[in-house]
């Protein structure tokens, strides 16, 4: 009898190739790579506003130079006065596991 170990990462089988292409294409439609964001900022003309959606304490600990501090909870009240609707917005928070940037982007889209 063969002792088969089931990989924890493969307990859910991999997606079919066509599904994977669709998923990753959609993901790139909505998310920017951090190195691309940095390169754009370094160019001096990024073509977008970078919004840090974290709270005041996190902002004070450190943030990306040139970012606009706009905590998620404040977006409905403050975004209209601070963001040009014609300029794309990229949001960020703590990192990939943090949904704060996602909530901030959704809030931005719902403001009008």
Image (spheres, rainbow, N blue to C red):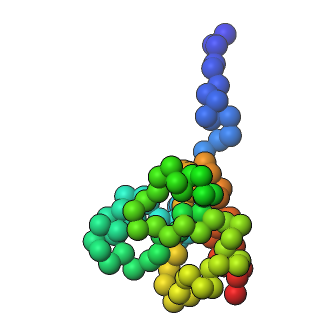
Residue ID at (63%, 20%): 5
Position in image of residue 64 (x %, y %): 43, 59
Residue 110, quarter of picture = bottom right
Image: 97 above or below 72 = above
Position in image of residue 4 (x %, y %): 63, 19
State whether residue 38 appears in this view. Answer: yes
Image: 75 above or below 92 = below
Seen in the image, is 64 located left or right of residue 6?
left
Seen in the image, is 34 located left or right of residue 77?
left
Seen in the image, is 65 located left or right of residue 86?
left
Q: Quadrant of the C terminus?
A: bottom right
Seen in the image, is 6 located left or right of residue 67?
right
**Viewer-nearest residue: 15 or 90:** 90
Residue ID at (47%, 52%): 62
Image: 81 above or below 99 = below
Position in image of residue 58 (x %, y %): 57, 52
State whether residue 17 appears in this view. Answer: no
Residue ID at (52%, 75%): 89
Residue ID at (54%, 67%): 69
């Amino acid at each position: 009898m063969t002792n088969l170990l089931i990989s924890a990462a493969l307990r859910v089988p991999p997606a079919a190739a066509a599904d994977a292409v669709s998923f990753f294409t959609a993901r790139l439609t909505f998310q920017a790579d951090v190195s691309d964001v940095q390169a754009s900022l370094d160019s001096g003309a990024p073509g977008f506003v970078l919004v840090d959606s974290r709270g005041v304490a996190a902002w004070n600990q450190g943030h990306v130079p040139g970012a606009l501090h706009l905590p998620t909870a404040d977006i409905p009240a403050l975004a209209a006065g601070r963001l040009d609707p014609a300029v794309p917005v990229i949001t960020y928070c703590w990192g990939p596991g943090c949904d704060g940037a996602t909530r901030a982007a959704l809030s931005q889209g719902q403001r009008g």
